[in-house]
Image (cartoon, rainbow, N blue to C red):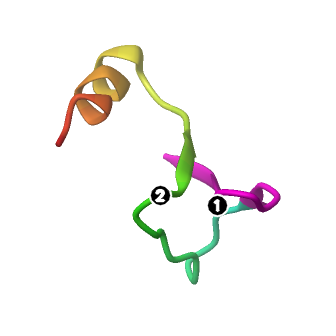
Amino acid sequence: TILGVKPPGEDFVYATDETRVSANDILIVSGHADLLERFAARP
């Protein structure tokens, strides 16, 4: 689950249905450790 997004140089914002992710954003996520590891390993 994507909880929020932190764009470079900006404040954290909670994710909504309207949230758009840009290339350099940091994603704040939650979920089972094995699924998060798989997600983090994606190119």
Residue ranking furthest to the top: 33
Residue ranking furthest to the right: 11
**Amino acid type of the residue that numbered disc 2 sits on in the rendered structure:** Asn
Question: Does 34 lie within the magenta span?
Answer: no
- The residue under label 1 is 7
Question: Does 9 lie within the magenta span?
Answer: yes
Mark 2 or mark 1, which is nearer the start of the sequence?
Answer: 1
Q: Looking at the image, is 18 positioned above or below residue 22?
A: below
**Amino acid type of the residue that numbered disc 1 sits on in the rendered structure:** Pro
Residue 19, percent from left and from top: 57, 76
- Do the CB atoms of the residues marked 1 and 2 lie less than 8 Å apart? yes
- The residue under label 2 is 24
- Mark 1, secondary structure of its residue: loop
Boundaries of the magenta span: 1-13
Q: Nearer the viewer, residue 22 or 4?
A: 22
At 46% from the left and 69% from the top, the residue drawn is 22
Would you call the spot at circle 2 few (<14 residues within 10 Å), some (14-19), or many (20 or more)? few
- Residue 24 lies left or right of residue 6; in this view the side is left
At 22% from the left and 29% from the top, the residue drawn is 41
Picture quarter containing residue 10? Answer: bottom right
- Mark 2, secondary structure of its residue: loop
Q: Nearer the viewer, residue 28 or 1?
A: 28
Residue 5, percent from left and from top: 62, 57
